[in-house]
Each structure stands twice: as C-alpha cells, then as structure tokens.
Image (cartoon, helix red, strand yellow):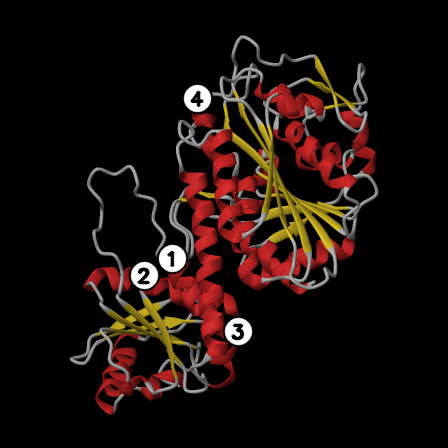
Amino acid sequence: MNITVSKKKLKDIDGDLYVIPVASGSEDGGAVRELGAEDRALVSSRIDATGYKAGVGKTLGVQSPRGDILLVGTGEDRTAETFRRAGAKAVAACAAVRVSRLVISAGSGSVAKKHFGAVLEGYLLGAYRFDKYKAKKDDHYEGPKSIVIAGTSLTPGSATKAVIDRTRKICGAVCMARDLINETSKVKTPNYLVKTAKRIAREENLKCEVWQGQRLVKEKMNGIIAVSAGSEEPGALIKLIYKPKTKARAKVALVGKGITFDSGGLSLKPSKSMEWMKQDMSGAAAVLGCMQAIAAVGPAVEVHAYVAAAENMPGGKAQKPGDIIEYRNGTTAEVLNTDAEGRLVLADALCLASELKPDAIIDLATLTGACMVALGSRVAGIMGTDQTLVNALISKGEDVGEALWQLPLVEEYNSDIRSMNADIQNIGGGYGGTITAALFLQRFVGDNAWAHLDIAGPAFAEKPVPYAARGGTGFGVRTLLTYLESL
C-alpha cells in the first residue's frame, strides 16, 4: 500500500473515495470547500435533506460522479482521537465499494499539521482483521492500493514521510500484539512468546535473554515454576533490552504478564470463563509490541522489558491451594487460589526489574475481573507508588485514546492479604480485588517508582470498538511508546 501526503485541494486529487472529517456546526465547511463546485453542491443538498449533524463518528455518504464522498463528524473538540476515529470510518467505506484510491482529508490549517498522523493511524488500526483460521475469508478485499492524506497546510517531504513511517511502524506493532492475543493457546505457548521475542530482537537489533528450565530454578523464578508445574509447556522469563544511540536520559523497566492460557489451575474456572483465556497474556503482548516499534520511535532512554510466561493448567504436578512460594527477594507467598496466578509470575519479573534500580517500573496485566466490574471494558485501572509517573501515563494514554483511571493503593487493605502461614497470600477478602492484587505486587518493587496497569477490560474487545475489531486490541503499546518518547 502506497501512502503519501498531498497539499493539493481535494478537487485536484484523483480518488475513488474522499473521506472528510467535519466539525460539528460546520458540516459543509472546512475541507468540504476544497471540493469542486458540483461536489460541494451535492454535499450541501445531502446535508439539508438529512439534517446531518457532525457528532463524533457520525457519517454521511454522498455519491458523486467523480468519486464517493464520506463526511465523518469530529464533534466540536476535534482532538487527535476524533480524527483517529474518522480515519477508521474509512475502512468499511472502502470495503463496501472496493476502493483502489483512497483520499483522506486531515482538515485544513494547523489542524491538518497536528492530526494527519492520527487519521492514518485510525485507518491502519481499523483495517486489522484476524482471519488466519477461516477457510473462507469473509472479505477478499485487501484494501486500497494507495492512500493520500490531504491537507493544504501539509508539506510533502522528509518530515511528513517520517510521521508516516513512524505511524506505520507503531500500528504494525499494535497489530502484531493483536495477532499474539488472538492466536490459539495450542500454538501460543510460552515457547512461542520466546520465539517471538527472539525474532523482535533480531529484526530490531535488541538484546534478548531467555531463562527456562534449570536457569529458572537457579535464578529463583519460583512463581513461574509454580504456575507452570501443572502444564506440559515449560514456563520462561524473557528479557529484551533497548539502548539508545545517544546517552540514555533514564532507565525504564517494562513488565508484562504472559499467561498463555489460564484454566485456573486446580482452582478451576467455569467453562464459560475459560473461553477467552487465550488473551491472558495481553500484558506480555503490549510489552513485546512496544519493543518491536521502539527503535523506530527512538526514545533517548534505556528500556529493559520482561515477560513472565507460563501456562496455568490443572495437571498432576500442579501447585495446590496452601502451597507456599519463596521469591527471589525473600518474600513468601501462600497460594490460596491457583486462579490468582498472574501476580505470582509477575512477582518474579518485578523482583528482577527492581534490582536494576530503574527510574520507573511499569507493569501491564490482565490481572483482575474486579477491575472490569469497577471500570468496565474500555478503561484500564492504574495504581502506583509515584504520582508523577501515574499522571504521565494517564496523560499519554489520553493522547493516544487509551483510557486509564487511577485507583488508590489503600494501605489498610494490606491486612486482607496477610497470610497466617507466609508473609502474604495471593487473594484478599473478596472486596477491592484490584487494589489487593496491586498491593501484592507492590511487595516486589522495592522503593522504585512503579505503576501497575490492570488492563483486564480494554485488552480484549468482545464486540468491535473504534479502530479495533472483536478480539485483542493491543491496548498499552501506544501509551508505552508515547510515554517513553516523552522522557
């Protein structure tokens, strides 16, 4: 697919479909005025006939002899997110008429300069589909052969090309993370994540280290060992390292939960609750996606990424309720429920991350259903020990359309995870489960600045959402990259 930028008016660009974001209250203004006189008249007539109002995501199609026109509302605020969603609306419109040449307006003036990357991002993310296992594809249309991002204030050249290249790389990384999440657990074992990490390291010139088998024993990765015990698939601790070309301004550790399938172990889940448990490694997918695109973004920070990978199964050697795990940092944890396994493997990786003494530790995990009860399916919870770090991640999440909402780390709730037989236990008393899970993890981060993202809700879409089809969303990749780039 050839993607270019043009500063020509829309009437001077050849296309089969023209997608034009329009502001509420100016439905026939802005870039619509760049159309030819005949097309402007058709648009105005259609607006009058339908009473179209350009609320966010609201569309109006107009047929023209020159090429179809699709107006997409951006509301009144016209943020990057509204332009991102406008770009995504082009996907279905393209498929409906098998468009070969797509023209997307990025608006006019400073708006175009600010948001043309967001328009492209919305289209590329919205075009993702996972149909690997469909014998008969729903749609053989592969998308337009060319996309022109139009804006009279844009200047084609190295700067705009850099934005296009960066956007394509980031969207490719998000889609890779989605592929990982959507892949079947029969294929997507911990060793599959190992192979993926090694591929990323080769392609992006990163350092990769993998601990498996006796190395896990030697390094006291006892959470991964315990959770993996019931499975025929061995667990792994994966580490990727990125170093900038210039002197690093900071050192950041990323940690991802990589449970490639979660049956609940001996504390077996109901069958309905297991249907989507292939997605329990979405935190790992986000971390791996971030590392795939990190060189293209080029942040001036050193990044150490850890993935704690395991399969949680109820085999004959599986860990049992009442077992006690002794961690690398000396903390002991009693396992009262084997279905609260994510925190058990994350503890291993957090121990390693804390030993780095980085400027920040950020972990991502589909950790608790309680977070979905509190925040629903579109918002991730965030908790942490450093408010500046938490605020920065919330802000960067808002910039890319990934919503984070802070929950408190209530110290008094530590009593809920106090164990009679060990230092802590892996479940609380039934209430505040998202917070008690985070308090469990806090025992392994030392005095480092730390933020925990519980992405149980937005990591996997059970129905389509803006610029993401049903399935894995790759939530977190863009937030992490934008945060790292800001340091």
> Element type at marker 4?
helix
Q: Position of residue 76 (x, y in %)?
A: 50, 75
Mark 2 burial class by Cα count in 10 Å: few <14, some 14-19, many 20+: many
Note whether residue 263 is visible.
yes
Residue 379: x, y in percent? 57, 49
Q: Which residue is mark 4?
A: 271
Residue that carries the numbered disc 2 in the rendered image: 91
Position of the C terminus, as image quadrant, is bottom right
Categorize mark 3 by other alpha carbons within 10 Å: few (<14), some (14-19), many (20+): few
Distance between mark 1 and mark 3 Cα atoms: 22 Å
- Separation of marks 4 and 1 at Cα, in angstroms: 31 Å
Amino acid beneath label 1: Gly
Please identify the residue farthest to the bottom as the structure is shown: 37
Residue 190 spot, x, y in % from top left:
51, 30
Please give left or right for residue 365 compared with residue 426 in the image.
left
| Secondary structure of residue under mark 3 | loop
Q: CA distance from mark 2 to mark 1?
A: 6 Å
Q: Residue furthest left?
A: 65
Q: Which mark is residue 126?
A: 1
Q: Are marks 2 and 1 in contact (CB under 8 Å)?
A: yes
Which amino acid does the dot numbered 4 rest on?
Ser
Q: Earlier in the sequence, mark 2 or mark 1?
A: 2
